[in-house]
Image (cartoon, helix red, strand yellow):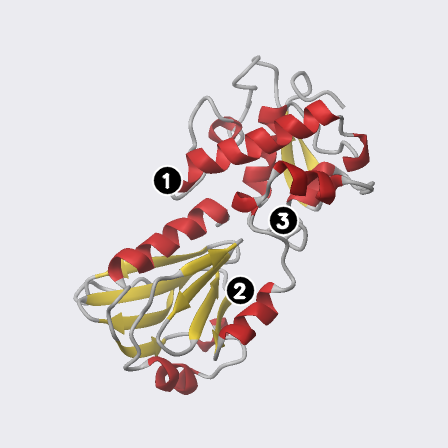
Amino acid sequence: MPELPDVEGFRTVVAEHGTGRRVRRVEVIDPGVLHGVQPGELDRALSGRRLRDPDRHGKWLLARTDGPTVMLHFGMTGELRWSPGDQPRHRHDRVVFVIDDGELRYRDMRKLQGLRLAPDDDAVAEVLAELGPDASTVSRRQLDAILDDRRGAVKALLVDQSVIAGLGNLLSDEILWRAGIHPRTPCCDLTPQQRDRLHRELRGVLRASVPAGRIPPRPSWLTGVRDDPHARCPRCGTPLRRDRAAGRTTVWCPHCQPG
């Protein structure tokens, strides 16, 4: 499932292969991934436009041009690939932006999200207004303000995009494991020391993940072992627990993260 590091990786794809280049045409192979815009309208709005430096907020990629902005969300299985134009297209390629020297291909198997066309910055801001601050920018003081007076579980808060944008299931579990906090701990019960650890691990996990363009599946990380048949904690060797929390499959260590 694409989370902040993955989307930052897709932003880099646009920056490296698209910035400064002109969109020749847009080929919509599957209109089911378009929201609020028709295939012909998307092509007419973007053809001849030059791509500018892309932005990201949370799990949204903002592919800006010298006119409108394409807002891309990758749901559970989406990705953005650059390819030379002569390479065969994948069966899950849904929208192809034909640019100078190649193609940017929006690929998505399950089609749970997709693309929107924002005519101006106000339209972009309207969509992003529903989101909290980007996870990579949250300061320790901001985290306190977010946690204060909230009685819900900390895992539910971390994956709530309206509170903090960009964190998903894997990142949240990794951060909580590293901070030694049980995922069902009420936010209002977190001690100052736990808040310190939560913020430190939030920044540290993102700092390590963003350059990789994904959450690294290292054996020393919870992410690297969580899907093993008999997964054990990389820190202490205790068998990991698995349950539903915040509507998602949640993995934690009962020894390192006591309830």
Circle 1 SS class: helix
What percent of the width, then of the height, locates residue 56? 46, 57
If you read the primary sequence from the N terminus, does the residue marked by circle 3 or circle 1 appear first? 3
If you read the primary sequence from the N terminus, does the residue marked by circle 3 or circle 2 appear first? 2
- Identified at 60% across, 40% down, the residue is 139
- Could you give the CA–CA distance between mark 2 and mark 1, rounded to whole angstroms? 25 Å
If you read the primary sequence from the N terminus, does the residue marked by circle 2 or circle 1 appear first? 2
Q: Residues within 10 Å of mark 2 (few under 14, many from 20)?
A: some
- Could you give the CA–CA distance between mark 3 and mark 1, rounded to whole angstroms? 21 Å
What percent of the width, then of the height, locates residue 109? 45, 60
- Could you give the CA–CA distance between mark 3 and mark 2, rounded to whole angstroms? 19 Å
Which residue position is annotated with label 1?
A: 211
Circle 3 SS class: loop
What percent of the width, then of the height, locates residue 177? 60, 26
Residue 149 visible within the image: yes
Residue 245 visible within the image: no
Which residue position is annotated with label 2?
A: 113
- Identified at 70% across, 46% down, the residue is 247
